[in-house]
Image (cartoon, helix red, strand yellow):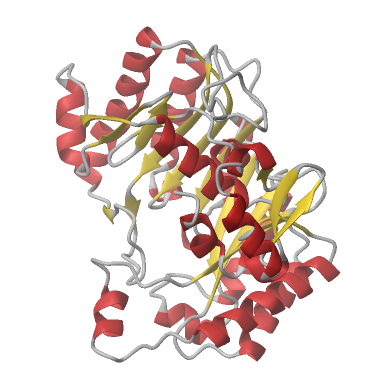
């Protein structure tokens, strides 16, 4: 049996020493997208300042209990850029004041084109944010309207240009395919417009109909339909277009120019420990996992009262940790060490015979066909 609680590295799930990765959830959005299942709410100007104070208070609580020396920080949401410039400045200055950032390699901030301004972009750059992930989703205005986005394709391009002009040298564009009514021609045009902007990174996600969303209800009523063959065609086109443009597919949904793979996300896929701050944020430390309350008002009240915001601990078993490590690792270009799946020789042999897995230098890697069925393959090793 492989020890999944060893020292840090590509072939281990967690590391000893300081906690290196921090995620911050900012739940506010100017508009609620009908497909999004993440915890989010419309921003209440009367509450957002108090919320920012709570984020810094929670960071200070953990800093007193855990050795924190981050190599990555990721502000996600929601829409972090929905905060005002003053609130963003207060948050980032608080992180600088609280943490030792001498080993910080990547600081990512998610942004929506509709909430990016020159002032905010310059502020983020001046405060040390090194990477922006821009939630474009599509360069087709009709599809953007369907998705409930607040920006147009032209605004997305303008926002990207603004970020570049403000000095950002590491920009990601988020895109979605498999949208209701979307054609392959529309997707190809979106990919071409994204490539033309010359980003360092492109993330492409197939739409999934998540519970508690408007799209899920419309799918259940038969208004929207899924087609696995069509989704496969979108997937194949994505890999072909982006690979031909010089991007490396280092994870099923993520493509990067050489040297611009997301450090934060790679740590997550390797199963490294991370601290989550903010409402609904999840943290994992060894075999201990916890999630914060999914309500930003209750979160702020609990944190500012001096108590924790956790809903309670979940204690993982080594078997659970192993299953997660295999599932996440198989999504990446490097796959997983053969030793991780040695307890399933028949399953591995069958997937190899089916052309879904291959062995490369003592590692098991999904083939191009296997990437289409990654979740099904991973289930065999639970």
Please tell me in which quadrant of the rendered image residue 169 appears.
top right
- Label count reads 0
Q: Where is residue 59 in the image (x, y as percent from the top left)?
A: 37, 21
What residue sits 49% from the left and 37% below the top? 322
Please tell me in which quadrant of the rendered image residue 90 appears.
top left
Q: Which of 225 and 354 is in front in this view?
A: 354
Residue furthest to the front? 346
Q: Is residue 237 left or right of residue 132?
A: right
Can residue 169 be seen here? The reply is no
| Vertical side of 377 occupied by 111: above or below | above
Q: Is residue 196 left or right of residue 27?
A: right
| Vertical side of 115 occupied by 21: above or below | above
| Vertical side of 93 occupied by 294: above or below | below
Q: Nearer the viewer, residue 257 or 345?
A: 345
Q: Which of 317 and 289 is in front in this view?
A: 317
Can residue 70 be seen here? The reply is yes
What residue sits 47% from the left and 43% below the top? 323
What residue sits 29% from the left and 26% below the top? 53
What residue sits 19% from the left and 43% below the top? 295
Q: In this view, does 381 lie to the left or right of 250?
A: left
Q: Where is residue 277 in the image (x, y as percent from the top left)?
A: 36, 31
Screen quadrant of the N terminus: top right
Q: Is residue 301 left or right of residue 33?
A: left
Q: Where is residue 327 in the image (x, y as percent from the top left)?
A: 52, 49
Q: Nearer the viewer, residue 320 or 333?
A: 320
Q: Position of residue 176 (x, y in %)?
A: 54, 71
């Amino acid at each position: 049996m492989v020890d999944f609680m060893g020292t840090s590295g590509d072939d281990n799930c967690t590391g000893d020493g300081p906690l290196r990765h921090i995620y911050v959830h900012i739940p506010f959005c100017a508009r609620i997208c009908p497909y999004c299942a993440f915890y989010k709410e419309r921003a209440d100007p009367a509450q957002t300042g108090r919320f920012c104070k709570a984020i810094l208070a929670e960071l200070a609580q953990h800093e007193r209990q855990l050795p924190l020396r981050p190599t990555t920080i990721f502000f996600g949401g929601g829409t972090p850029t929905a905060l005002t410039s003053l609130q963003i400045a207060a948050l980032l200055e608080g992180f600088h004041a609280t943490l030792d950032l001498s080993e910080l390699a990547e600081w990512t901030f998610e942004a929506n084109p509709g909430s990016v301004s020159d002032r905010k972009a310059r502020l983020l750059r001046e405060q040390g944010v090194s990477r922006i992930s821009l939630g474009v989703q599509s360069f087709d205005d009709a599809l953007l309207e369907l998705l409930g986005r607040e920006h147009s394709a032209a605004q997305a391009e303008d926002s990207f240009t603004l970020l570049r002009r403000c000095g950002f040298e590491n920009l990601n564009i988020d895109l979605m395919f498999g949208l209701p009514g979307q054609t392959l021609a529309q997707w190809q045009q979106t990919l071409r417009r994204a490539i033309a902007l010359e980003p360092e990174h492109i993330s492409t996600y197939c739409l999934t109909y998540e519970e508690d969303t408007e799209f899920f209800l419309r799918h259940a009523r038969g208004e929207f339909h899924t087609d696995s063959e069509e989704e496969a065609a979108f997937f194949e086109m994505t890999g072909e277009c982006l690979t031909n443009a010089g991007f490396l597919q280092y994870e099923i949904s993520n493509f990067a120019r050489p040297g611009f793979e997301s450090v934060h996300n790679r740590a997550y896929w390797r199963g490294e420990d991370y601290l989550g701050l903010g409402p609904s944020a999840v943290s994992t430390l060894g075999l201990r996992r916890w999630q914060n309350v999914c309500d930003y008002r209750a979160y702020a009240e609990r944190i500012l009262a001096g108590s924790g915001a956790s809903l309670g601990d979940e204690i993982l078993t080594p078997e659970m940790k192993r299953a997660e490590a295999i599932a996440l690792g198989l999504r990446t270009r490097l796959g997983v060490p053969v030793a991780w799946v040695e307890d399933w020789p028949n399953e591995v042999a069958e997937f190899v015979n089916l052309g879904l897995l291959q062995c490369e230098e003592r590692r098991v890697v999904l083939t191009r066909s296997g990437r289409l069925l990654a979740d099904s393959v991973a289930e065999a090793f639970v």
